[in-house]
Amino acid sequence: MDTSANLILAWPWALLLLGLPWLLRWWLQRLTLSRESTSRVAALRLPLQVLPDSESSPPILVSRYRPGWRSLLWLLLMLALARPEWQQDEIEFPHQSRQLMLVVDISGSMNELMQGRTRLDQVKQVVRSFLAERPDDRVGLVVFGGQSYLYVPKTLDHALLLHQLQGMQPGMAGSGTAIGDALGLAIRSLRQSEGESAILLLTDGANNAGQLTPAESLAMAKNSGIRTHLVVVDLNPDPEISRAIRQTGGEVFSAFSRRELEQVYAQINRLEPVTRMERFTPATPLMHWLLLAALLLLMGVAWQQRHGKKGADRHD
């Protein structure tokens, strides 16, 4: 995309009016010639004394038209009507900005197979497709097992995030499942965010490690206005956590296959509208400079005519 500054005309069609005076002059000349031809025909039938003077001058609009300052004045006015603008670089800014935090379970149980591949591998592929549809969202990554880590702060560099996630292996964050701590870490990261924030928590187990309980962390999410969605893999969701999730404004899903996992993330995609970028191209209008030039031209002509007339009167 070429964003270099350049000169444009907002209403270029106005330049079609540039030839209007010349067209009008041509039409009046043709009209005058037509009248003279009609007068010659009438001379054969009417008395000579009632004929108009054959040497009569053409209409004043034709006889007094002279190229020069009038042409320049017309050119300035038509260029002003075309609204020239100096267009600057295009500016992009987010509309309905969306901040997401992916909270992904990498405990040892994520090494269990689901349709021939580990649960974590299936999640990695689905998350890749999910992010491909949200290129302008700021997305961060928290991973957890017995410990939780802010592995990637919120970023637009989704390739980096996916690269880091791809390198994760089950059990790397220790044994256990610290859901509450992972949520707390995600909430702290999102509290200072601008725009809508949401957490996508994915796990295949129950909380059995860490200092915070899921209920405590979800209460913080609710108070902070951060919607939290829960995706449970190969397991039915816990009713208590499900109630706390819904109190944040989020939804609870379970998936027992790759296809169901894809459907879940597609539904989350609809629940959390993507960030939309709006584009604005600032422009500096130049029309007023052309109108000022036209005004100065008229003032100069008026001054010249006035002083020329006074000089002629003194000469007489």
Image (tube, rainbow, N blue to C red):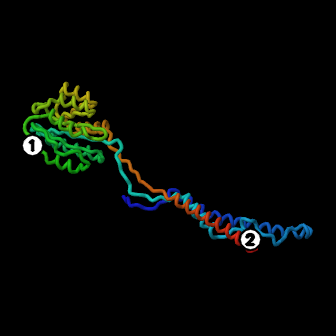
Instruction: Check the image and name the residue furthest to the bottom.
Output: 315
Name the amino acid type tagged 1.
Answer: Met
Q: CA distance from mark 1 to mark 2?
A: 104 Å
Residue type for callout 2: Asp
Q: Label 1: which residue? A: 172
Spot the residue most to the front: 314
Query: Relative to 221, is 172 above or below?
Result: below
**Image quadrant containing the N terminus:** bottom left
Q: Quadrant of residue 130?
A: top left
**Residue annotated with mark 2:** 313
The residue lying toward the viewer, choosing from 148 and 308, is: 308
Q: Secondary structure at mark 1?
A: loop
Residue 299 seen in render: yes
Other-residue count near label 2 (Cα within 10 Å), few / some / many at <14 / 14–19 / ≥20: few
Question: Residue 271 appears at what percent x and percent y?
Answer: 31, 36
Instruction: Report the disc number at residue 282.
Output: none
Residue depicted at 9% across the width and 43% down the height: 172
Q: Nearer the viewer, residue 121 or 158?
A: 158
**Nearer-N-terminus badge (1/2):** 1
* Rendering coords of residue 100 (x, y %): 25, 41
Would residue 219 appear left or right of 20 to someone viewing this image? Answer: left
Left or right: 280 with respect to 207? right
